[in-house]
């Protein structure tokens, strides 16, 4: 049971705190609209990770190169559009529109879901790492498998929620000028991340998690070993 809890904690914290499009969109929304607006985005893994988990546990054992290519292109395009929307909204030097609390947030929950599910990264993670570890613990003891998932999602969402709280606090202390600058910078970051995904899709140079490396990090034997 301890191994399952530790594995879930490590992988959940890595997912919730690692710099990337998901954390950028959560932080940007908290900085723009506050903690309450960002909290639903922090809960997005309940969709964006549960769907790949179920699919890989029941159906998928791999992704074809063509599927990875198309996911890179589509996911990258979505991130570019979100980044453009964010950076263009804060392109001027006038008073930031984020001061209007009744205005809609630039990044929406559906943006996070689409940008994540259409990217190959979560699918490759669950195929190569998450699902094999879950299945191994589930076969040993159903409670271990459930504990692994519970801790993983709690750590992922909890760390993203903490990030949202910290960013929302920054919203209170930053002057509108600097808040606007940071939001525009985050938009540019999403554009670059999207272009990188598109590049990976075109060239086939998709970065994948090395299951053996993760298994060694967690101190767990590989499946079938």
Image (cartoon, helix red, strand yellow):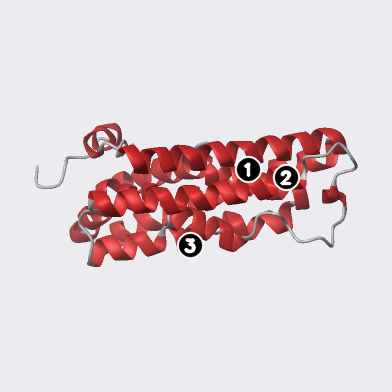
Q: Is residue 135 left or right of residue 91?
A: left
- Whether the residues at callouts 3 and 2 have beta carbons within 8 Å, the answer is no
Residues under labels 3 and 2: Cα distance? 30 Å
Q: Which residue is mark 2?
A: 88
Residue 46: mark in rendering:
3
Residue 163: which disc? 1
Residue at the extreme right: 95
Foreground residue among 171 and 94: 94
Residue at the spot 35% in from the left edge and 60% down from the top edge? 52
Q: Mark 3 or mark 1, which is nearer the start of the sequence?
A: 3
Give percent across and percent down for residue 126: 31, 52
Res 186 → quadrant:
top right
Q: Give x and y (percent) for residue 137.
A: 24, 54
Mark 1 vs 2, N-terminal side? 2
Q: Secondary structure at mark 2?
A: helix
For label 3, count other residues whose C-alpha is less than 10 Å away and answer few (under 14), some (14-19) or many (20+).
few
Residue 1 appears in the picture as rendered: no
In front: mark 3 or mark 2? 2
């Amino acid at each position: 049971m301890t191994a399952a809890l530790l594995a879930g904690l490590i992988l959940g914290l890595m997912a919730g705190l690692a710099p990337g499009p998901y954390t950028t969109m959560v932080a940007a929304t908290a900085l723009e609209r506050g903690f309450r607006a960002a909290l639903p985005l922090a809960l997005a893994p309940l969709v964006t990770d549960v769907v790949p988990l179920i699919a890989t546990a029941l159906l998928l054992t791999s992704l074809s190169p063509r599927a990875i290519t198309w996911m890179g292109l589509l996911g990258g395009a979505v991130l570019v559009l979100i980044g453009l929307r964010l950076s263009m909204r804060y392109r001027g030097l006038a008073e930031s529109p984020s001061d209007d609390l009744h205005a809609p947030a630039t990044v929406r929950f559906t943006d996070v879901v689409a940008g994540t599910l259409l990217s190959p990264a979560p699918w490759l993670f669950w195929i190569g790492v998450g699902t094999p570890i879950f299945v191994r613990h589930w076969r040993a003891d159903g409670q271990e498998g459930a504990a692994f998932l519970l801790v993983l999602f709690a750590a992922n969402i909890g760390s993203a929620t903490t990030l949202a709280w910290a960013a929302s606090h920054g919203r209170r202390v930053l002057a509108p000028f600097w808040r606007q600058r940071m939001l525009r910078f985050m938009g540019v970051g999403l554009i670059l991340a999207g272009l990188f995904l598109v590049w990976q899709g075109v060239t086939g140079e998709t970065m994948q998690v090395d299951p053996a490396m993760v298994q060694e990090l967690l101190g767990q034997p590989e499946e079938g070993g």
